[in-house]
Amino acid sequence: MAVGVIMIKPILDSIGYHSVVKVSFYSSVAVFLMSIVSTLKQISNGVKVQVSPALILSFGSICGGVLGNYLF
């Protein structure tokens, strides 16, 4: 499934039907949904998720994305 997400952006970019912003959004949503599904699957398999580090990493990722977009 990860290979599919890796291929979404280049394939949609090459088709040229959607703008770069939309293609980036579609790719980001696909990765986000995959991470949610993967996490829920791991929880259902009995893996304990440490909420505090997960929230810190999530917040850091959001800040890094916003800062990177601003600097770019």
Image: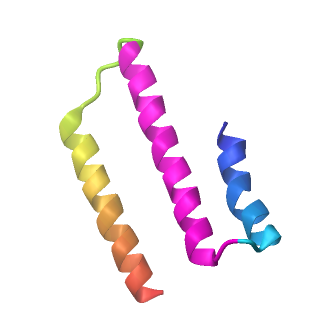
* Quadrant hosting residue 41: top left
Q: Is residue 59 left or right of residue 35?
A: left
Residue 39, position as x, y percentages in the image:
41, 30
In the drawing, does residue 1 fall left or right of residue 46? right
Residue depicted at x 77% and y 74% = 16
Magenta span dominant secondary structure:
helix
Report the residue at 67% width, 36% height from top: 1
Horizontal and vertical percent position of residue 27: 58, 58
Q: As rendered, which of 12 and 36 lies closer to the eye?
A: 12
Q: Tell me which residue sits at (23%, 46%) in the image.
A: 55
Give the left or right position of residue 4, taking residue 47 as reference.
Answer: right
Task: Kindly identify the residue that appears in the image at 43 percent across and 80 percent down.
Answer: 69
Give the magenta-colored segment's residue range. 18-44
Taking the image as shown, residue 38 lies to the left or right of residue 56, namely right
The percent coordinates of residue 6 (x first, y second) are 69, 52
User: Could you say which quadrant of the image residue 40 lies in?
Assistant: top left
Residue found at the very far front of the displayed protein: 17
